[in-house]
Amino acid sequence: MHIHSKLPHVGTTIFTVMSSLAHECGAINLSQGFPNFHPSERLQRLVFEHMQRGANQYSPMPGLLSLRERIAEKMERLYGRALNPDAEITITAGGTQAIFCAIAAFVHPGDEVILIEPGYDSYRPSVETVGGIPIPFALSAPDYRIDWEALKRRITQRTRMICINTPNNPTGTLLREEDMLALSRMLKNTDVLVMSDEVYEHILFDGEQHASALRYPDLYERSLCIYSFGKTYHNTGWKTGYCIAPPELTREFRKVHQFNVFSANHPMQAAFADFMADPSEYMGLSEFYQRKRDKFQQAMAGTRFKPLPCYGTYFQLYDYSAVSDEPDLDFCKRLTVDYGVAAIPISSFFSHKPNDKIIRFCFAKTDDLLEQAGERLAKV
Ligand code: GLN
């Protein structure tokens, strides 16, 4: 039998490849992005309490209304947009599922989708699965700044969507107000939609503010904004996120979502709804992770790796050109096997692999592990 693959060039995601290798080698795993510490005890207890009280069957398809109301309150407070929880917010089985549905709901076969790279590795296969054509737009180290004039030249009659991500995984860079306004101007009078991946919205350093698409009315009217509880509450394995979009876009989004997962985890949603009543949990996250970033940079100070600027997320890029001229994937594998520290090669975030000697470390780890990683990497 001939299997006609929709994704002939896709293998196993780099996050699984590197985490498995780290596990096999007993290495410190700074590759796949997840915390090695526990979510709040109270939050865990709330999940259990809701299970005991019967939140064990399907939640409503768009998610629990109580949770969507809490989200609407948060977004109004932070980004100044009043949302209709019933018509504009959908709870999803994590950010990645929301991204897939946002793309699948709008991209027709032959439609072009502009992917700013380096970018999260699920965007491209999501576009390809539904027959869209990825149009990569590559940015350069160390600033990874977007030249909006150059980007504008990539827009054609067939452009259906542009995917943005701030704070950015893997670079730790941010889109700022001037970027969002340039994007908004560029798309005025077009039918191009925006998938705005904002899953690291609460992790920005040195006093930076998150330039959410929700803040800009002209941009929001064409945007599907994606968020994640996992990044915010240290529970990536609970796979709960959400999509915020204007009612007409949300209607289309839900047509796909309902036949993709139908609905997200019920007890987790109920627990998040209670837990979100206290904003201090997420309002302190930037400070928490800034300390981790600084701790990791300190731990790395005795190595020959050179840090790139990091303004947000829990990822830090390092240039290893003083250490080796191996390709980044080979280098990451050797680091894991020989030195016991796993990282992610930046080439995994590009369609056309650059020759950069740059790798990504996740610093959402306990201080002792960050210190130990620094000691091991000092031997490289
Ligand atoms: N977003 C996380 C990262 O970039 C991992 C997500 C995943 O493993 N699918 O590391």
Image (spheres, grey):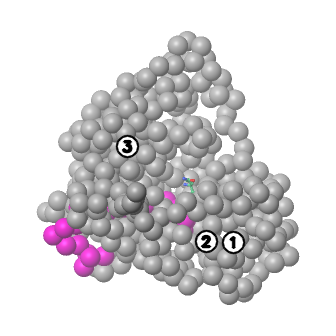
Q: Secondary structure at mark 1?
A: helix
Say which residue label 2 marks.
345
Say which residue label 1 marks.
332
Say which residue label 3 marks.
243
Residue toward you, 252 or 82: 252
Q: Which mark is residue 153?
A: none
Q: CA distance from mark 1 to mark 3?
A: 34 Å
Give the residue type that dot 2 points to: Pro
Question: Does 355 sit above or below residue 199?
Answer: below
Q: CA distance from mark 3 to mark 2?
A: 29 Å
Residue at x-position 61% and y-position 17%: 49
- Mark 1 Cβ inside 8 Å of ligand 1: no
* x then y, percent, for residue 20: 69, 56
Dot 1 or dot 2, earlier in sequence: 1
Left or right: 25 in relation to 60: right
Q: Secondary structure at mark 3?
A: strand
Q: Are marks 1 and 3 in contact (CB under 8 Å)?
A: no
> Which range of residues does the magenta coloring cover?
151-173
Left or right: 38 in relation to 52: right
Dot 3 or dot 2, earlier in sequence: 3
- Disc 2 crowd, CA 10 A, few/some/many (<14, 14-19, 20+): many
Give the residue type that dot 1 points to: Cys
Q: Are marks 1 and 2 in contact (CB under 8 Å)?
A: yes
Instruction: Classify the position of the N terminus by image quarter.
Output: bottom left
